[in-house]
Amino acid sequence: MNETDPLILVIEDDPQTRSLLKTNLCNKGWRVIEAEDGKSGILQIKNNNPDLVILDLGLPDLDGISVTKRLRLLSDLPILVLSARSQEQNKIMALDAGADDYLTKPFSIGELHARLQALLRRVKRAGCLEVFQAGELKVDMARRKVFLADVEVHITPIEYRLLAILIRHAGLVVTHRHLLKEVWGIEHIHDQHYLRIYMGQLRHKLEANPTRPRYLLTEVGVGYRLVDDGD
Ligand code: CA
């Protein structure tokens, strides 16, 4: 382990989950620091400047949404929230407050690694992604052109904007609210039917089987996730 390995802060009051996370992240070669409540978590961020935060939504002092809001005032670092099944609404609020993605407990280690890799990749390539590729889907970001198995697919400007946002967050969930705000503006954040229509069109153009999408996945009740094949 050395200084250049990603430093991950785990904010979680349950010792069992914390030790499970620590063991698995250390096995992966990542460095781990821990906090058992929101206030000490925020302090750890100020003092240790971690690369990523795993934040449990149910903490004894501050709730995860307040922690997310406070963290966002301090830093742009990636936040992965852990939520129990009973915290569906909190999970969406945390995402809207600036968390980047979530895992629902109980989660598999495979899912955990995939989410963390996607978050760390997002940071690494922020602003400088020229070509996005996943399977047969290729998007030339500079020329705003989309290809499927090397054949150009014609998409409309709105479809492109939707796709570009999902690409910026590849592998991560993007909430309905976030997409509506970025593409149509704040006055349309409740017009979910816009998304259904345009995502339907995109799937028709990009998916072999639009009803069983391979690239543009639905996160029920939350938003959409573009598959990220890795680097
Ligand atoms: Ca908890």
Image (cartoon, rainbow, N blue to C red):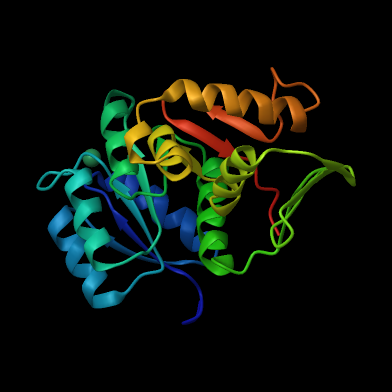
Residue at 39 percent of width and 41 percent of height: 185
Residue lying at the far left of the rendered structure? 61
Q: Is residue 142 above or below residue 166?
A: below
Give the mark count. 0
Left of 133 or right of it: where is 96? left
Residue lying at the far top of the rendered structure? 211
Residue at 47 percent of width and 20 percent of height: 193
Residue at 48 percent of width and 54 percent of height: 24
Residue at 63 percent of width and 37 percent of height: 159
Q: Position of residue 195 (x, y in %)?
A: 51, 27
Left of 152 or right of it: where is 14? left
Which image quarter: residue 65?
top left
Image quarter for ligand 1: top left
Which of the pair 205/209 is nearer the observer?
A: 205
Left of 134 or right of it: where is 53? left
Q: Position of residue 80 (x, y in %)?
A: 39, 49
Q: Position of residue 56 (x, y in %)?
A: 28, 45
Q: Quadrant of the C terminus?
A: bottom right
Which of the pair 21/85 is nearer the observer?
A: 85
Residue lying at the far bottom of the rendered structure? 3
Q: Position of residue 40 (x, y in %)?
A: 16, 62
Which of the pair 53/193 is nearer the observer?
A: 193
Which of the pair 223/41 is nearer the observer?
A: 223
Left of 14 or right of it: where is 4? right
